[in-house]
Image (cartoon, helix red, strand yellow):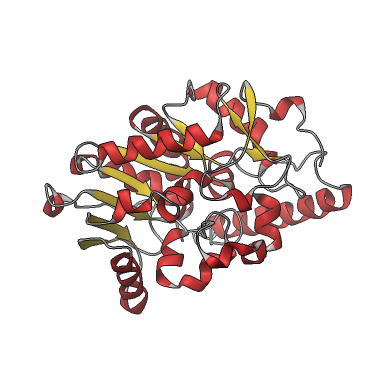
């Protein structure tokens, strides 16, 4: 494992990444950037305490940021010397090809499509530009009122998202976003919150609002998965499956009738989360957890989805090689 270069160390310290209830996921040498010296165990418990205390009482948006959000916010970034030269060369050629393809699509009025510059939607060139210009502002609002769950781990056998660190550090400085233990947690703590030893505090007996683009059978499977977690009630707020950056949400009918809100909106989640403030409850960007609720076998494909108390965690075979490397 190569050490993190100086320009990637965008926060004052780096702490060992161990999460209570998921000790079998631990990889020696894996750390996460932090604003101050803190034990990750204490960080996790404090995060759980804050969300639990806010349930049914106050607005607390939690937005995850990983490679997709970095790409949308910052644009493609060079891989740097953490990666082998052959990987860097292939990535540069692929990025050039994708930029040319998307430019052709923009010029034709077709917008960008998932799988090239970013995922989670189909937009015209003007819509994409407007949404991207507003994206940083939305994240800034969430950092002031809630928590950014940012993927700033490093030290994995193979690098994953670390090449965005320098540009993200510059963005933080430019926007005046000061990350502290109050408004930042590591990305995977959201998964651990909703899948780990304290998940019953968030879900069991709670009235849950779900803001998501699923419909039909997929929607029914997600609701069934939440019911297996013991939720008291599920109210569904439908959004589009490919326009979440621009969707408008009417949550008036939910006022006073929900304890917690779970959001699945891809890269467009900051737009959704800020609109949910009138609910006055925690609004959590749950992301891939919805996939695990809809199909329990998919939990094997992501880290921090199967806690140590589950028999399936007896070994790490439930983690794909790529996910284990990116952890």
Q: Is residue 121 above or below residue 31?
A: below
User: Is 73 placed left or right of 218 in the picture?
Assistant: right
Q: Find residue 319 and report its image quarter.
A: bottom right
Residue 286 in view in this figure: no
Front one among 29 and 250: 29
Residue 180 in view in this figure: yes
Q: Is residue 7 above or below residue 18?
A: above
Q: Find residue 8 and report its image quarter.
A: top right
x then y, percent, for residue 40: 55, 34
Which residue sits at x=49%, y=52%?
A: 125
The extreme right residue here reads: 85
User: Is 97 placed left or right of 149 in the picture?
Assistant: right
User: Is 274 placed left or right of 44 in the picture?
Assistant: left
User: Is 208 placed left or right of 119 in the picture?
Assistant: left
x then y, percent, for residue 298: 52, 69
Front one among 14 and 151: 14
Q: Is residue 312 above or below residue 153?
A: below
The extreme bottom residue here reads: 217
x then y, percent, for residue 2: 82, 38
Front one among 190 and 269: 190
Q: Find residue 253 and report its image quarter.
A: bottom left
Which residue sits at x=56%, y=30%?
A: 39
Number of numbered markers: 0
Q: Give the quadrant of the N terminus.
A: top right
x then y, percent, for residue 300: 57, 66
Which residue sits at x=81%, y=55%?
A: 90
């Amino acid at each position: 494992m190569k050490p993190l270069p100086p320009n990637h160390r965008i926060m004052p310290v780096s702490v060992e990444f161990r999460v209570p209830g998921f000790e079998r996921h631990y990889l020696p040498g894996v750390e996460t950037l932090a604003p101050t010296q803190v034990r990750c165990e204490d960080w996790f418990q404090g995060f759980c305490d804050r969300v639990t205390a806010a349930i049914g009482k106050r607005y607390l948006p939690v937005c995850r940021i990983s490679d997709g959000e970095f790409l949308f916010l910052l644009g493609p970034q060079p891989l740097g010397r953490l990666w082998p030269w052959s990987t860097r060369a292939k990535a540069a050629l692929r990025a050039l090809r994708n930029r040319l393809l998307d430019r052709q699509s923009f010029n034709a009025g077709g917008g960008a499509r998932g799988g090239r510059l970013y995922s989670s939607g189909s937009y015209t060139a003007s819509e994409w530009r407007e949404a991207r210009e507003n994206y940083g502002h939305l994240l800034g609002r969430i950092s002031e009122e809630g928590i950014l769950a940012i993927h700033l781990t490093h030290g994995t056998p193979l690098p994953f998202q670390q090449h965005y660190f320098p540009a993200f550090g510059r963005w933080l400085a430019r926007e005046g976003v000061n990350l502290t233990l109050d408004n930042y947690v590591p990305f995977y703590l959201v998964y651990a919150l909703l899948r780990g030893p304290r998940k019953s505090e968030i879900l069991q007996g709670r009235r849950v609002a779900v803001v998501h683009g699923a419909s039909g059978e997929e929607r029914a499977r997600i609701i069934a998965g939440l019911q297996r977690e013991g939720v008291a009630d599920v109210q569904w707020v439908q959004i589009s499956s490919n326009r979440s950056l621009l969707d408008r949400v009417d949550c008036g009918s939910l006022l006073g009738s929900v304890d917690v809100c779970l959001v699945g909106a891809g890269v467009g989640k900051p737009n959704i989360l800020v609109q949910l403030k009138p609910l006055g409850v925690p609004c959590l960007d749950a992301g891939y957890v919805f996939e695990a609720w809809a199909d329990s076998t998919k939990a094997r494909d992501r880290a921090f989805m199967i806690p140590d108390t589950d028999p399936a965690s007896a070994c790490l075979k439930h983690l794909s090689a790529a996910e284990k490397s990116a952890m």
